[in-house]
């Protein structure tokens, strides 16, 4: 899957996120790239909602780095690395452990900060501004 979209609202961003949920419903890693405020957490909310997690429970884990949600026997991890300059050894070990379980659903905001440990099999989502209200979302699947 290699697609590019232009969105004009949060609702459209969530719809695009939901469209990839089938690709990861049994496990997978989604890596989000983009500047501050481009809509990475909105994308995560749309993806989580399509997997059955209520919107209200998806918050940016900026101060905890990792939020774990369990729904219908599935482990969903929302990771936000915004505050980190680099990943220390302990966090790298924890992230590797989470990624070892192929049944885990993992969404990583600011994934560029852990590019050295990203799995080869993943979906990259690059979100960028096109103007104040529009975003370009490029989705690339790595197999």
Image (spheres, grey):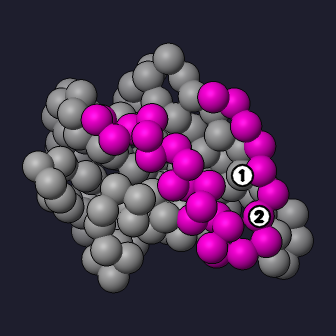
The residue shown at (67%, 67%) is: 12
**For the residues carrying marks 1 and 2, which lies nearer the camera in this image?**
2
Q: Is residue 95 above or below residue 1?
A: below
- Circles 1 and 2, Cβ within 8 Å, touching? The answer is yes
Q: Which contiguous range is marked in magenta?
A: 1-27
At mark 2, the secondary structure is: strand
Q: Residues within 10 Å of mark 2 (few under 14, many from 20)?
A: some
> Can residue 45 be seen in the rendering of this structure?
yes
Residue 38: x %, y % from top left: 67, 67
Magenta highlight on residue 16 = yes
Residue 86: x %, y % from top left: 41, 48
- What mark, if any, has residue 77 been given in the picture? none
The residue shown at (81%, 77%) is: 133
* Quadrant of residue 64 within the rendered picture: bottom left
Q: Viewed as shown, does residue 134 lie left or right of 61?
A: right
* Quadrant of residue 102 within the rendered picture: top left
Q: Which quadrant does the N terminus fall into?
A: top right
Magenta highlight on residue 103 = no
- Foreground of the two, 18 or 38: 18
The earlier-in-sequence mark between 1 and 2 is 2
> Can residue 84 be seen in the rendering of this structure?
no
The residue shown at (63%, 73%) is: 11
| Direction left: furthest residue | 73
The residue shown at (30%, 62%) is: 52
- What mark, if any, has residue 137 been given in the picture? 1
Q: CA distance from mark 1 to mark 2?
A: 8 Å
- What mark, if any, has residue 7 been given in the picture? 2
Q: Residues within 10 Å of mark 1 (few under 14, many from 20)?
A: many
| Direction right: furthest residue | 131
Q: Viewed as shown, does residue 140 lie left or right of 81?
A: right
């Amino acid at each position: 899957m290699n697609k590019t979209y232009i969105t004009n609202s949060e609702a459209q961003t969530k719809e695009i996120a939901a469209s990839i949920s089938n690709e990861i419903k049994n496990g997978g890693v989604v890596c989000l790239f983009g500047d501050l405020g481009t809509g990475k957490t909105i994308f995560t909310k749309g993806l989580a909602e399509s997997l059955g997690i209520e919107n209200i429970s998806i918050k940016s884990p900026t101060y905890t780095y990792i939020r774990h949600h369990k729904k219908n026997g599935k482990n969903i991890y929302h990771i936000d690395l915004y505050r980190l300059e680099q990943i220390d050894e302990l966090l790298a070990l924890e992230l590797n452990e989470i990624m070892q379980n192929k049944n885990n659903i993992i969404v990583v905001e600011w994934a560029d900060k852990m590019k050295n440990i990203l799995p080869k099999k993943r979906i990259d989502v690059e979100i960028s501004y096109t103007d104040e209200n529009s975003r370009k979302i490029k989705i690339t699947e790595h197999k």
